[in-house]
Image (tube, rainbow, N blue to C red):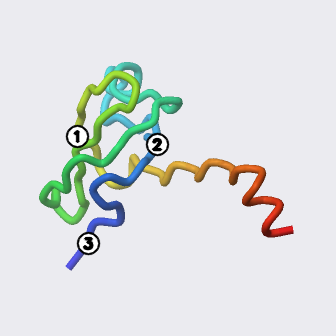
Amino acid sequence: MTRHKFSIGQKVKCLPRGRTMADRQVRLDPNERYTVSRLLPLSGFDPQYRIQAVSSGRERVVMEDELLVEDMPDMPEAANAAHA
């Protein structure tokens, strides 16, 4: 059974892989940051997610192959010094 790769609350980025040209132009902004708000049932064999834009709060449904893990922010200077 296929499982969801991302979890609720996880920060992600989207790839502009809409199913139509209109989707690619309007649906996904590759510079926007999103939070996974709900795990949805599979579409065929592909997991789906409801995600919410951090800046606007707009929600959308995407397939798992449209998501990437958001890069972790740099560690604060104090933490960097502790690891040196």
Asked which secondary structure carries label 2, the reply is: strand
Say whether residue 17 is left or right of residue 73: left
Say whether residue 63 is left or right of residue 31: left
For mark 2, does the 10 Å Cα neighbourhood hold few (<14), some (14 to 19), or many (20 or more) residues?
Answer: many
Seen from the viewer's position, the closer of residues 59 and 80 is 80
Looking at the picture, does residue 52 appear above or below residue 7? above
For mark 3, does the 10 Å Cα neighbourhood hold few (<14), some (14 to 19), or many (20 or more) residues?
Answer: few
Q: Residue 54: where, in percent of width, then height?
A: 38, 32
Q: Residue at x 43, y 40 (%)?
A: 14
Q: Residue 77: where, in percent of width, then height?
A: 77, 50
Q: Residue 2: where, in percent of width, then height?
A: 24, 74
Q: Residue at x 38, y 39 (%)?
A: 34
Please report contact status of discs 3 and 1: CB closer than 8 Å, yes or no.
no
Q: Distance between the Cα atoms at labels 3 and 1?
A: 17 Å
The amino acid pointed to by label 1 is Val
Q: Distance between the Cα atoms at labels 2 and 1?
A: 13 Å
The amino acid pointed to by label 2 is Lys
| Mark before the other along the chain sequence, 3 or 1 | 3
Seen from the viewer's position, the closer of residues 80 and 16 is 80
The label on residue 61 is: 1
Say whether residue 11 is left or right of residue 59: right
Report the residue marked by disc 2: 13
* Quarter that holds the N terminus: bottom left
* Quarter that holds the C terminus: bottom right
Seen from the viewer's position, the closer of residues 15 and 75 is 75
